[in-house]
Structure formats: structure tokens, C-alpha cells
Amino acid sequence: MSQHTVSSFDEELKEVAGRVSEMGGLAEMMLNDSVQALVRMDKELARRVIAQDKRVDALQFEIEEQAILIIARRQPVASDLRDVISAMRISNDLERVGDLAKNVAKRVIAIEGTFDSKKFALGVEHMTELAQSQLKDVLDAYAGRDGVAAASVRDRDDEVDALYTSIFRELLTYMMEDPRQISVCAHLLFCAKNIERIGDHATNIAENVMYMSTGVLPTDERQKVDETGIETDAAS
Amino acid sequence: MSQHTVSSFDEELKEVAGRVSEMGGLAEMMLNDSVQALVRMDKELARRVIAQDKRVDALQFEIEEQAILIIARRQPVASDLRDVISAMRISNDLERVGDLAKNVAKRVIAIEGTFDSKKFALGVEHMTELAQSQLKDVLDAYAGRDGVAAASVRDRDDEVDALYTSIFRELLTYMMEDPRQISVCAHLLFCAKNIERIGDHATNIAENVMYMSTGVLPTDERQKVDETGIETDAAS
């Protein structure tokens, strides 16, 4: 970050970055709790996750408002402008992460009765661990303005995608074996898809951290978008 | 819009709005073509939809860049600032619409063989008509800065949600009746979900058009998020 004659400008940038980190922490917690609620079929925990989403939405609103004020008042250029734009974009991705976790929580409430969670939810749980570590690492990379660490998070998205593909097939098999499980497995399919998309948002965040440190948004499309996706489950 | 002494400012605002409308037209077309590709299992058309998404992404990038330049250079206030912010937000929603349509197109390519499209895809096709008319009407409301028309689009989101819920149940029934159709129906479930989410984005756009004309973002949460969603399929 360049030196500014007006020190309160730096403080404003730090305040925005602090809110992004707070939002990231909340989104991480929502992801963790929503999948814990799913594995344990804990509807009370699911309701708490749903309630938390309002705070995430409010933070996004505040970050956007603050960022626009900074752009209008300070007319930042170069790396300062990139910081502000990245904060807006990253908060947008984090808002989506919160939404997707909330949707998992809603499905916990929608699923009637219980299911063989060990067997069914194991894959989703494992996938969540990967997505969580992606999210954690990219938030650390954001806090440390570490483009190299961000690039390594971006490279790891294939793992989540590959696991999603295998869970997709596994759940279809369970459906075929026992049609009474079709409804539960359909909900789990959507949960798995949500976690996979959380991985995509972690990747978007990684690209924005790279943009912050280099000034260039990575443009080489990741392979999965055109290859694995089409062959298997058409990841978005 | 207020009168400006610098006429090129108005031109800049018009240019941004023109790009948003162009993006909207493209997103509409992608939605229509992706579902036509699904109904007819036309993989060639699906590939064309996928290719179009790059243009939508590029437009979003251009709109964001232009909007930030305007905020920094012109320091707009009141309704002008709302215009610029809304353009950014609406382009963000339209980019998601393009993504969701692209995902439907990818599924057309992923589905192997054929299926009884008349029976299976009828619901998705009908839902698409509703989502399309929402999208068309909200883009007209945007072009005409018509907050009243936007509010009426917002009120119509329940129709798409209700239809999605009925399609969700219908597809589960088909799966139970004939397990060989489980894989195809799982793809159709995701397609239906994508269309339902396109309806949500049309609603977001409607809220931004309302914000443009009134300065207030509607905050009363729509009923479906907390009621129907939980009872039936947990719409995100």
C-alpha cells in the first residue's frame, strides 16, 4: 500500500478491510455450522445459521456503501483503488457464501425424519472440510495481501470439484438402490452443489486477492468449467 | 435524472445504462436458448449459449469499470449516484443470470441419450416462460426508470417459486416410478432450480430499479424465503 499524506485515508481502507475479514469469519462459521447441522440433523443449529445471514447481508451493504464513499471522496488510484474494488467484490462473494450456507441450513429443516447420515453425509462433510480450508486460507491471504497464497487456493478448486462429481454419482446410486431415499438424497444433492459453489466463491476471492497484489485479474479459465463439468455434472 | 451543467456526464450515464440493457438482452436470449436446447436436446444450441456467456462477463467488467470511473471523476450524488450504483448491482445480477443459463446449457450436453421431454421438461418450460416475462418486464422497467412496474415484477416472484416447488415434487415422483430416469431427473431438478434462481435475480433487479426511483431499497423480506422455502424445497 502506498504512503498517504492524509492518514485517515489509510484508516478508512483498514476499516473496510476489517469488515471484509469480519464478514469472512461469519461466512466460515455459517458454512461449518450448516454442515454440522446437516450431519447431526440439528434443526435448532440450522435455525441459528439462518438467522446469522442477516448480519452477513448487512455487512455487505456497509462495505459497499463505505467503498463508494471512499471512491467518491478520495478518488483513489492504482493499488488503493484496487483495494477498494476488491473489498466490494470479495464482500459480494462472501454474501453468496452466506446464502449458500443458509440454504443448506434450510434443507436441514426441510428434510423430514432422519436418514443414514453416516453413509449419506460423509461425502458432503469431507467436501465441506476442503471448502472450509479453501475459505480460511483465502481469507488469510486477503488479510496478508498474499497473492502467492491466493494463487495456491485457486489451484486447489479442482479437488472440491472432483469430490462433488463423485458425491453426485454416489447419491444417484443410493437413489436407485432405495427409492424411499430419493427425497432426502435430492436435498443432499443440492447441499453438495452448494458446497461446491462455495469452493467457486473461494476461488473468485483468490482471484481478487491476486488482482490486489498484481493489478491483473487472472483470465485463464479453470479447466473444470469446460471439461469435467460437461462430462459429469455440469458444474456452473 | 437531474440536469447537469456538464452534458458529457449525462452521456456517460446513458452509456452505462445502454450497456446494462445490452447485457439484459443477452441474458434474456441465453435463458430462452438454454431451455429451448433442453426441450429439444439440441446440443449445438447449448454450445452456442455457453459461448455467449463470455460476452456477458465482459460487459459486466466494462460496466463496473465505467461506473467506478464515473464515481471517482464525477463524484455524483443523490439520484445520479443511485443510477451508477444500480447499474453495477444490476449487471452483477445479470451476470448471474447468464451463468445459470450457461449451467442449464451444460446440463443439456451432460445428459446422455434422450428422455421423454414432453412429460419431463414441460414444467421447466412453463417456469421459464414466467421467469422470462419477469426478466423482460424488469428490464423494461429499468429502461423506463419505472419503480411501479418494478414493484409489480417483484410481487410476481411467488408464481415462479410455487411452480418450482410443484416441479420439484413431480420430478421426485418420476424418479420413484422409474429409477432409470433418476440421472436425467437429477439434471432437470438442477435446471428447474437454476430457473427459479433466475426469477430471484429478476426480483433483485426489480428492487434496484425501485431504489433508483425512490432512493430506498425495499427491506421487507419476501414471504417465500422463510415460509414456503422451509416447508417444501428450501429455496435459497
Image (spheres, coloured by chain):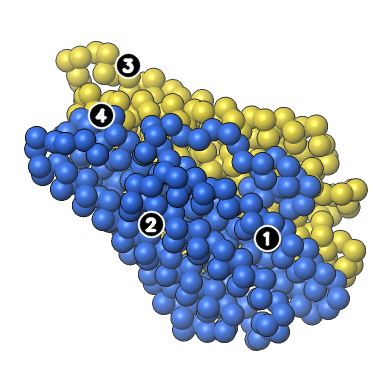
Chain colours: A yellow, B blue
Q: Mark 4 = which residue? A: B77
The amino acid sitting under disc 2 is: Asp
**Callouts 2 and 1 close, C-beta under 8 Å:** no
User: Which of pointers 4 and 2 indicates the residue nearer the eye?
Assistant: 2
Q: Give left or right: position of A231 versus A141.
A: right
Q: Mark 1 = which residue? A: B164
Q: Secondary structure at mark 1?
A: helix
Q: Mark 2 = which residue? A: B140
Asked whether the viewer can see residue B141, the reply is yes
Q: Nearer the viewer, residue A212 or A76?
A: A76
The amino acid sitting under disc 1 is: Tyr
Q: Nearer the viewer, residue B11 or A195?
A: B11
Query: Residue B129: percent from the left, percent from the top?
Result: 55, 68
User: Which of pointers 3 and 1 indicates the residue nearer the eye?
Assistant: 1
Query: Residue B159: percent from the left, percent from the top?
Result: 64, 56
The amino acid sitting under disc 4 is: Val
Picture disc at residue A11: 3
Q: Residues within 10 Å of mark 2 (few under 14, many from 20)?
A: some
